[in-house]
Amino acid sequence: MAVELATREITDQEVLSREQLRDRLLAVGAARYHHRHPFHLKMHQGELTRGQLQAWALNRFYYQASIPIKDALVLAKSDDPAFRRAWRKRILDHDGDQDGYGGVEKWIQLAEAAGLSREQVIPCTGILPGVRYAVDAYLSLVRDHSLLIAVASSLTELFSRDLISLRMDKMRQHYPFLTPGLAYFQGRLTQAPEDATFALDFVSTHAKTREQQEQVIHALEQKCAILWAQLDAIDYAYVAPGNIPPGCFVPHCD
Amino acid sequence: MAVELATREITDQEVLSREQLRDRLLAVGAARYHHRHPFHLKMHQGELTRGQLQAWALNRFYYQASIPIKDALVLAKSDDPAFRRAWRKRILDHDGDQDGYGGVEKWIQLAEAAGLSREQVIPCTGILPGVRYAVDAYLSLVRDHSLLIAVASSLTELFSRDLISLRMDKMRQHYPFLTPGLAYFQGRLTQAPEDATFALDFVSTHAKTREQQEQVIHALEQKCAILWAQLDAIDYAYVAPGNIPPGCFVPHCD
């Protein structure tokens, strides 16, 4: 009933207020963000093996390694030095100031804690095609659409702090061997909310028509689907039912 | 032992003969073509429900509908009218000469035989993101690489006749309600081998260095992965374990 009233109040023609837009975006996250994915639920319940966590860390590395490339594509869309200065922080966060620092490096350390070698992780050989296609779809989404849509696709960071906080607790509890590799998540606890605040303010300011606001919402739905599909591929290959595609990584530790 | 000998005979520097190249391509199919995918095995054993077949027909429609677009991208890469004339046949096969004919239309008829309406199928709403990303990866592979690689990626047609022939038998046996929708496969029984012969001759003639021959083999591996990943997504969502992603098609018939 509340939903019906809300639907009547907001016609297709009306521009949403900042609060209404934020509520719509939060609703997308509640329904579609990958905190609800069965693979994450199993992870948090302590049901995954070390080999399954290896497969997750290995495959998700392709996503992590693509984030600064995605952010460079975003930078390249803006003609505003102030925007570029602000967004540049993200590339710094992931690439660091020198070799051995930054989020990409910290993800390698997580994979090492799971039992993989750096040499296994960095070349991205053996990752699942389904993960590769999903990540490449993210790069295409950013490359081939407007700056507004590119920024909106980053809004999954609105939801990541809670998931990361829970994940760190559960990893320490169920998979203590991962504890030395949690620096990536520690960094994201502060980086992600800062980034999300900036991006939410940007889309709230620059989506001036209802059509643009709907584009923003749809971009967030698409990004949620991209994250979700990566876990679909990992869960299918390594957990349930466990059909590893030809040529992909095979865990050997259990 | 035979494999070791073969490996010694063919160094990285040597150009493969036409027969050696063909054998390498056939070996890729034997190991990686989707006739071996668990979803197809279950289909052929009569284990799928009508709803699962609907999900397959609906999702695979996005692939079918993308084939003539892929072939137009191939056409656009060639400066040879004779090549373009030959390849143009494929677009004709899929689009037909008029409304109501051609492979894309015949696939819609298959989906209708499974119990879907034309209006459900054509917009491609509700298809799995994982299927969409895989098909889009096929379009990117063709768009962003050489004509040689684009043609090589079609070589899965070397293997499709046997699979289609088996599938038609099994559909008539296990899912007789699909029988009115088998015209697509009937057409492909002759089209696919003709197309494969042309494409195999093309790559055998135009891959003149060992490096180009390896590109051809790798392109076929990539195409096999694209087909395989579509079935991964369908099997995971609708069969085992059956986790339909948010916003995707939900069968209602069983």
Image (tube, coloured by chain):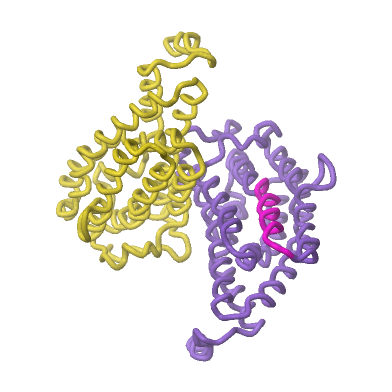
Chain colours: A yellow, B purple
Q: Which residue is rendered at x = 72% and y = 74% of the image?
A: B201
In the rendered view, does B37 fall on the left or right side of A203?
A: right
Q: Which residue is rendered at x = 42% and y = 26% of the image?
A: A206
Q: Which residue is rendered at x = 73% and y = 50% of the image?
A: B172
Quadrant of res B199: bottom right
Instruction: Specify the farthest residue to the right.
Output: B97
Q: Is residue B41 visible?
A: no
A143, above or below B82, in the image: above
In the rendered view, does B140 fall on the left or right side of B172?
A: left
Residue B166 position, x and y percent, is 69, 60
| Magenta residues, start to end | B64-79
Residue B76 magenta: yes
Residue B226 position, x and y percent, is 55, 56
Residue B41 position, x and y percent, is 57, 57
Residue A128 magenta: no
Quadrant of res B49: top right
